[in-house]
Image (cartoon, rainbow, N blue to C red):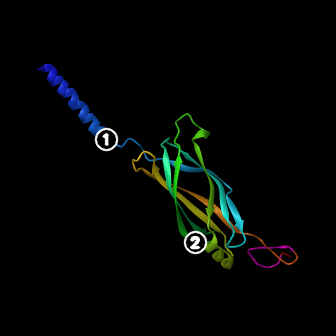
Amino acid sequence: MRKGIILLLIVFSFAILFTACQQVKITPAPEVEVYHFNPVGTYIASPFDTVVIDSIQFIVWNHVDAIIREMSYSYRSVRDDNIVGSSIDAGLGFLLSGGDEYCEESCITTLLGIVLDVTDVFSYMYTNNDNVVAEITFSGEDAYGEEKEFSCKMYFAVMLAPMFSEENRMIPIETGGNNE
């Protein structure tokens, strides 16, 4: 009888422990940061120019694998910080390796060839003689299905290319006059 009660207590204890572990979320939200990107900005001369960010490196500081689900960006004026271009959302499914406490450069994950559309914002830049900054936001969640969300931002400069006069001399963008 005693062995039956002890066995029943052991089974009951495991059942409680298993149920309690299912209720506790032990996975923290990923701490993702844009570690480095290249180039930091670019010049454009027409609305048809292609703006490409060659590489963006991410690091997960707390070693939790993560998935970038979405990238969105909007353009902000350099002069007054107002949003001058519409936000554009792009779906991604990019896995970021969290690694472990011993990794250094192997924990950095690189995303290559991100293209930004400048068609809409170019007319604002040209008519207002203003440069813009693309505020790019990456958002996602942990890779374990715990729905622990994260987001991180980066800023990419988009500038009007310098104009040239008939004598092939640069015309300053600020004044629009000649360079004498």
Q: Sequence order check: which comes first, mark 1 or mark 2?
A: 1
- SS for callout 1: helix
- Circle 1 or circle 2, nearest the eye: 1
In which image quadrant can residue 114 be found? bottom right
User: Does residue 89 appear to the left or right of 115 in the view shown?
Assistant: left
Q: Residue at x 16, y 20 (%)?
A: 3
| Most distant residue in the right direction | 167
Going by the numbered disc 1, the residue's amino acid type is: Gln
Q: What number is the disc on residue 140?
A: none
Q: Is residue 107 left or right of residue 10?
A: right
Dots 1, 2 in contact, CB < 8 A: no
Asked if the stretch drawn in magenta spans residue 58, the answer is no
Q: Quadrant of the C terminus?
A: bottom right
Residue displayed at 55% across by 33% down: 102
Q: What's the amino acid at mark 2?
A: Gly
The residue lying at 48 percent from left, 43 percent from top is 64
Residue 22 x %, y %:
31, 41
The answer for how far apart the CA atoms under marks 1 and 2 are is 45 Å
Instruction: Give the quadrant of the N terminus.
Output: top left
Disc 2 crowd, CA 10 A, few/some/many (<14, 14-19, 20+): some
Start-end of magenta stretch: 168-178
Residue 155 pos. (x, y %): 60, 60
The image shows residue 2, relative to residue 111, as above or below, that is: above
Q: Is residue 175 magenta?
A: yes
Q: Which residue is mark 2?
A: 85
Look at mark 1 in the image and give the residue it sits on: 22
Determine whether the residue tagged by mark 2 lies in a helix, strand or loop: strand
Q: Residues within 10 Å of mark 1 (few under 14, many from 20)?
A: few
Q: Position of residue 168 (x, y in %)?
A: 86, 73
